[in-house]
Image (cartoon, grey):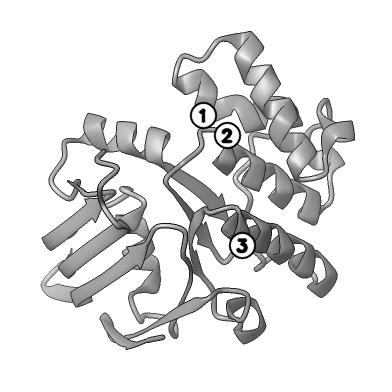
């Protein structure tokens, strides 16, 4: 990935069409957007607006039907599956509404999981897991498993896991959707601190109070970008 690019992500005329039998569903109808490095975005829109589809494409979990997607200056929309997996592992960090932790693994093992896939040594994995667990305030929970943690603590583990590989972009899909108000504030304070430290964050949310933490907002409707501010 080139360091010369000003933008963490650039998409141009993204179209995504799903064939549903005899019917076609146009999830994205020509989306163009730029996300500068170090920026914090809230992506909003009603159900069916295309925001989740766009996040799937930005996360290299799906491909556009047409259009271009550049991640840190590199075109990735037409990469083969193995190359897409490599991009996900090395350049993207994911935080999901449902946490997506492995129940059989400890906090330390969950945080270190993407590092194992990268072939990082066991010693280095534990070192980084400890570092990021400390950052999210869970240093005393390294040996606990997900079912021994609160929802807010599980989401902190998910954030630490997303950070473990030092990704170019953190993608968050309704990261406070399963949390109460107090826990949501704690999680958003973490995102605010990450933004302050220079991380690029793109967060899908339908909650106005959560979107208010972001410095920019992209609003989608009917598969199109309707507002950017």
Q: At 14% from the left edge and 74% from the top edge, which residue is drawn?
A: 24
The disc at residue 94 is: none
Q: Gap in Å between the C-alphas at discs 2 and 1? A: 7 Å
> In the shown orientation, is residue 35 left or right of residue 193?
left
Please say if 75 is above or below 11. above
**Residue 27 percent location from the top left of the image:** 25, 74
| Label 3 residue SS | loop
> Which residue is nearer to you in this view: 169 or 106?
169
- Residue contact between numbered discs 2 and 1, judged by CB atoms under 8 Å: yes
Q: At 63% from the left edge and 47% from the top edge, which residue is drawn?
A: 159
The earlier-in-sequence mark between 2 and 3 is 2
**Residue 9 percent location from the top left of the image:** 30, 58
Q: Residues within 10 Å of mark 1 (few under 14, many from 20)?
A: many
Q: Gap in Å between the C-alphas at discs 2 and 3? A: 18 Å
Residue 98 sits in quarter: bottom right
Residue 123 shows in the view: yes
Q: At 65% from the left edge and 10% from the top edge, which residue is drawn?
A: 123
Q: At 35% from the left edge and 65% from the top edge, which residue is drawn?
A: 35
Looking at the rendered image, the disc whose residue lies closer to the viewer, 2 or 1, is: 2
| Label 2 residue SS | loop
Q: Residues within 10 Å of mark 3 (few under 14, many from 20)?
A: many
The disc at residue 114 is: 1
Q: Which residue is mark 2?
A: 164
Looking at the rendered image, the disc whose residue lies closer to the viewer, 2 or 3, is: 2
> Which residue is nearer to you in this view: 203 or 104?
203
> Which residue is nearer to you in this view: 212 or 105?
212
Residue furthest to the right in view is 140
């Amino acid at each position: 990935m080139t360091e010369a690019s000003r933008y963490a992500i650039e998409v141009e005329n993204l179209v995504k069409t799903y064939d549903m039998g005899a019917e076609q569903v146009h999830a994205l109808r020509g989306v163009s957007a730029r996300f500068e490095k170090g920026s914090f975005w809230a992506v909003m829109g009603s159900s069916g607006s295309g925001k989740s589809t766009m996040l799937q494409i930005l996360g290299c979990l799906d491909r556009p039907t047409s259009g271009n997607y550049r991640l840190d200056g590199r075109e990735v929309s037409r990469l083969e599956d193995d190359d897409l997996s490599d991009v996900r592992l090395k350049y993207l960090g994911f935080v999901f509404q449902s946490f997506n932790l492995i129940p059989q693994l400890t906090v330390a093992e969950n945080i270190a999981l993407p590092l194992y896939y990268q072939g990082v040594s066991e010693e280095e994995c534990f070192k980084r897991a400890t570092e990021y667990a400390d950052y999210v305030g869970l240093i005393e929970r390294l040996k606990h498993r997900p079912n021994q943690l609160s929802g807010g603590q599980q989401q902190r583990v998910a954030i630490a896991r997303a950070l473990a590989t030092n990704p170019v972009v953190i993608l968050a899909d309704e990261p406070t959707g399963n949390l109460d108000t107090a826990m949501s504030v704690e999680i958003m304070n973490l995102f605010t601190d990450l933004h302050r430290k220079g991380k690029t964050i793109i967060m899908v949310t339908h909650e106005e109070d959560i979107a208010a933490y972001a410095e920019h907002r992209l609003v989608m409707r009917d598969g199109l970008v309707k507002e950017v501010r």
